[in-house]
Image (cartoon, rainbow, N blue to C red):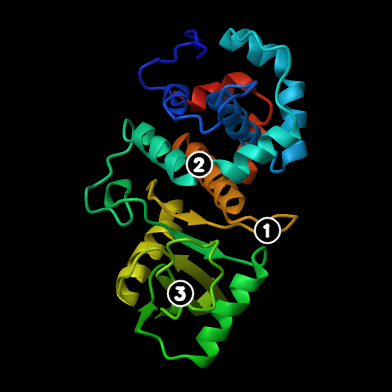
Amino acid sequence: MLEVPEFGNLAMNSNLIEYLKEIRDFRTSARYELWLILLLIIMGNLSGYHSYLALEDFAQRHYSVVREKLGLKVKRFPSDTTFRRIFHRLDFRVLAQQFHRWMEHYVEIEPEEWLSIESGNDYVIGVKGNQPKLLQEIQRQAQQEIPVSEYTHLDTTRGRVVHRQLRVFNNLTTIDEQWSGIKSLIQLHCHGTRERKPFEEVRYYISSLELSAFDFAQGIQRHWSIENQLHWVKDVVLKEDSAPFCDHNAASNWSLIRNITLNLVRHNGYGSLTKAFRFISHDLDKIFSFLQ
């Protein structure tokens, strides 16, 4: 395996690259080290590149600088097909665990933190329009079946009035087998006023856990309060992308990468991804500094 020389003031015993290098490569033979591919994916996402072709463009654009900075001997960087294969085959839970371990150097994560990595290989995944069959089935159950658990909460903090109703379902007979380990289907219905404007939204989730509606509500609320405090929890929230994903593992990996990107930019003082992209896009020195 290639050794990464020290660059800048990066402490080699705690930088993210070292943790990426610990991930076992599931391929029997490969032109590119797995850690290098994962690094390019994270760096590309920090510059706003969110597709396979875009990642190839990012890698080729910065080939010379990255190659020199890391002391690499590869003659070129991966193509879009290589990135695609990694997204489809990499176990997203392994990458989540390594990122979590690295973040422990900077953020104190309590043992009881909801869905922390120590609790096992469990997940909560938000489902949106890029998984139409799964979404339709959860919506059907929410309309036609009785939940196994239900929780309602009224939030009147920070000048808002928000009614939240979370319901949990467990009829899994019609769920595609590709979604392995599912034990709960979740509907979260929110409505009320924010900044004196009415709103209503419904979110859907799947989970490998069997928890009460109250416990799910507490965990999901912690995730969305990341605006105020950095919490790395082992959950993956699917984002709507320009193209649908037909593969569960690829969708989970894309969502995890976006979550990692979000945590990195907020840990470095940026309040939003949009603002961060304006300041750090293609600034490799700045991006590498995020990996310390």
Question: For this rendering, which residue is in front, 181 or 192?
Answer: 181
- Between the C-alphas of marks 1 and 2, the distance is 22 Å
Q: Is residue 88 above or below residue 83?
A: below
Q: Quadrant of residue 210?
A: bottom left
Quarter occupied by the C terminus: top left
Question: For this rendering, which residue is in front, 266 or 136?
Answer: 136
Q: Amino acid at mark 2?
A: Ile
Q: Residue at x 62, y 78 (%)?
A: 136
Q: Amino acid at mark 1?
A: Cys
Left or right, 50 with reference to 203: right
Give the image location of residue 20, x and y in percent: 47, 28
Instruction: Report if residue 71 is visible in the image.
Output: yes
Q: What secondary structure is found at the residue carrying circle 1?
A: loop
Q: Which residue is mark 3?
A: 186
Instruction: Report if residue 200 is visible in the image.
Output: no
Q: Which residue is mark 1?
A: 246
Q: What secondary structure is found at the residue carrying circle 2?
A: helix
State which mark lies toward you, 1 or 2.
1
Q: Quadrant of residue 133?
A: bottom right
State which mark lies toward you, 3 or 2.
3
Q: Amino acid at mark 3?
A: Ile
Give the image location of residue 27, x and y in percent: 56, 31
Q: Earlier in the sequence, mark 3 or mark 1?
A: 3
Q: Residue at x 52, y 47 (%)?
A: 256
Q: What secondary structure is found at the residue carrying circle 3?
A: strand
Give the image location of residue 61, x and y in percent: 76, 22
**Residue 44, which numbered label?**
none
Q: Which residue is mark 2?
A: 260
Q: Earlier in the sequence, mark 3 or mark 2?
A: 3
Q: Earlier in the sequence, mark 1 or mark 2?
A: 1
